[in-house]
Amino acid sequence: AHLSREFGIEVGQRTTCWSHRQVLRPPAVRRAVDGDALLSHLKLECAPLIGAKRSFGAIGTLPEGLYARNYNFLFGYAWRRSGCGIVSCAMFVAPRIYRATFEKRVMMQALSTAGFVIGIGRCTSAWCAPAYPHSLEEHDRKEDRLCNECVENLTALYGRIAAANAPPADR
């Protein structure tokens, strides 16, 4: 697979490692992956999944830091309605962190990234999973539920999908 060859990544539910220098920032800056380069490759690799029946897309996780364009670090990254996204676990690890805290951080970011993958943007409720956090402290204040705005956006999206996939009316 292309991601395996280029980045040392396996698509699926396995732990993987990175080894590709072209998408890494210079070590003097810090070890981080170029989100745009990774999304390009992830999108190619996951093309059979993206848009497939019963699939909204794919979200990958990685242990390294993540950057893109003018952002020095990102908790997650996705191109809106692209069908794929990335969650970086690097910012969620600390020397004395409880496993439950780490798992909650990753889950909150996965919910946020999934919203972008399917075309739902950021909301305005700071406690909602898709809200943009400016720090890890803000990220930790998020709750594991969606605000009314996000529920309405998700309901509208599902309604559009259901309408598009409905069988033709009987005549």
Image: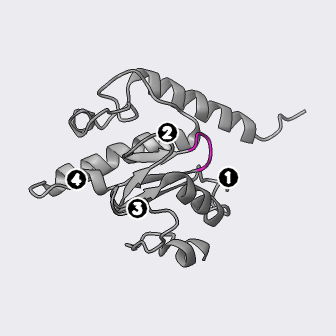
Dot 2 crowding, Cα within 10 Å, few <14, some 14–19, many 20+: many
Q: How far apart are the alpha carbons under marks 3 and 1?
A: 35 Å
- Which label sits on residue 26? 3
Dot 1 crowding, Cα within 10 Å, few <14, some 14–19, many 20+: some
> Which portion, as a residue range, is magenta?
79-83
Residue depicted at x 50% and y 72% = 7
Closer to the chain start, of discs 3 and 4, is 3
The amino acid beneath tag 1 is: Gly
Closer to the chain start, of discs 2 and 1, is 1
* Extreme residue in the front direction: 28
- Which label sits on residue 51? 1
Closer to the chain start, of discs 3 and 2, is 3
- Which label sits on residue 21? none
Residue 6 lies, in percent from the top left, at: 56, 74
Q: How far apart are the alpha carbons under marks 1 and 4?
A: 30 Å
Closer to the chain start, of discs 3 and 1, is 3
Residue 154 lies, in percent from the top left, at: 52, 32
Q: Which residue is mark 4?
A: 102
Quadrant hosting residue 50: bottom right
- Which label sits on residue 115? 2
- Given contact means CB atoms under 8 Å apart, are the residues at marks 3 and 2 in contact? no
Q: Is residue 158 left or right of residue 132?
A: right
Q: Could you tell me which secondary element the residue under label 1 belongs to?
A: loop
Closer to the chain start, of discs 1 and 4, is 1
The amino acid beneath tag 2 is: Gly
The amino acid beneath tag 3 is: Pro
Magenta span contains residue 81: yes
> Which quadrant is the N terminus positioned in?
bottom right
Q: How far apart are the alpha carbons under marks 4 and 2?
A: 20 Å
Dot 3 crowding, Cα within 10 Å, few <14, some 14–19, many 20+: few
Viewer-nearest residue: 86 or 104: 86
Residue 20 lies, in percent from the top left, at: 48, 72
